[in-house]
Amino acid sequence: MAVDYAALKNGGFMRQKQKNHFSMRLKVVGGELEASQLAAIAGIAEKYGRGRVHLTARQGVEIPFIKLSDVERVKAELVSKGVFTGVCGPRVRTVTACQGSAVCPGGCIDTYALARSISERYFGRELPHKFKFGVTGCRNNCLKAEENDFGVKGVYFVSWSSAACSLCGVCVKACRQGAISLREDALIMDENLCNNCGRCVKACPAGAWKGEPGYLLSFGGLFGNRIAQGRQILPPLRDTETLFRAADAALDFFDEYGRPGERFLSAIERAGWDVFEKSVQAEVPRA
Amino acid sequence: MPDARMEPFRPDAVTDVTDVLCPLTFVRAVAALDELEEGQILEIRLNDGEAARNVPLSLKDEGHQVLRLTDNGDGTCSLLVRKLEN
């Protein structure tokens, strides 16, 4: 029987060095799985693999040692239990995320919701080469946004109300940028130092600091053969609608300029960052 | 006229967490608050830096009322917190 390796790879089956064995990559969004999905995965690993799974570097799960002859059966069994296979090859990969504002006290944005939206819109889309999205909830950057082709980092647009402020001094210490100082009857904020981390809002016991979620994007990150930090070419965005316009523009640019087998950053560099910036900025209204 | 917001708070108890690191700073602060009645005020002496940045936020998230954080100028800060039941 001729093996269609390309079809296997689409379905997230990674050839192992052991003949006729595959490591099955599963679909995980934002690093979140239901306990029932974990139970199904455990069952498959016991039944068809060697009773083990591998947790990948990008929040994925793989079940190694699946026999080629079992592939279709395993796939069907997993789907019946709400578990889907991942992808490999030149397409949009697993969308990663930290726990964000749904769970983490530091989170400025709902990373799970955003990761799911990104995944629904782009997961598996074919492109000149692999393409990775990562969503991190705040400046602490637990999810390492800038190592992705397209990174999202949650921030806050902050504002202070004198009337509600108790001048307690908590925000002065909470701010890592040293942007806030306390006078006898007022706070002074140096907006040039503010990096929108939102810690003043999180820490304020009086509700005097208010924050609106924002999205800081980075483009062209790599963390493989070549290592490069994704670049910020836009100010923080105020809504996900604009974020998706920027993402659409970035992927369309990659489709248009990327050569087969070339990563996003290389395509940007060959076309010129100025050309790329123009094509994305055209989709984003000026603040 | 003096600003009413700057009225002094009188602590009912004092605890020092400058000899421990996160997360024990928070744990010890919560343990000290446990000893108080609702409405009473705890003064917590903590190190400047990580503890001063994070402990006030954590106690706020626990539902207590953070009143004031003062830099003592010696590498420590004093945090005043009113115990609230949730």
Image: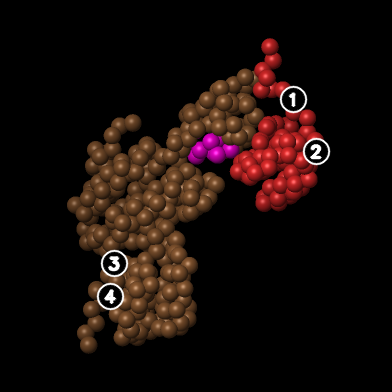
Type of amino acid at the residue the image marks with label 4? Leu
Of helix, strand and loop, which one carries label 4?
helix
Residue B34 versus residue B8 in the image, above or below: below
Label 1 and label 2 in one chain: yes
Type of amino acid at the residue the image marks with label 3? Gly
Q: Give the left or right position of residue A31, taking residue B59 as reference.
A: left
Give the letter of the red chain: B
Q: Which mark is drawn over residue B8? A: 1
Is A199 magenta? The answer is yes
Q: Which mark is drawn over residue A89? A: 3
Give the labeled residue for mark 2: B13
Label 1 marks a residue whose chain is B
Of tags 2 and 4, which is closer to the observer?
2
Give the letter of the brown chain: A
Give the labeled residue for mark 4: A8
Residue A14 versus residue B5 in the image, above or below: below
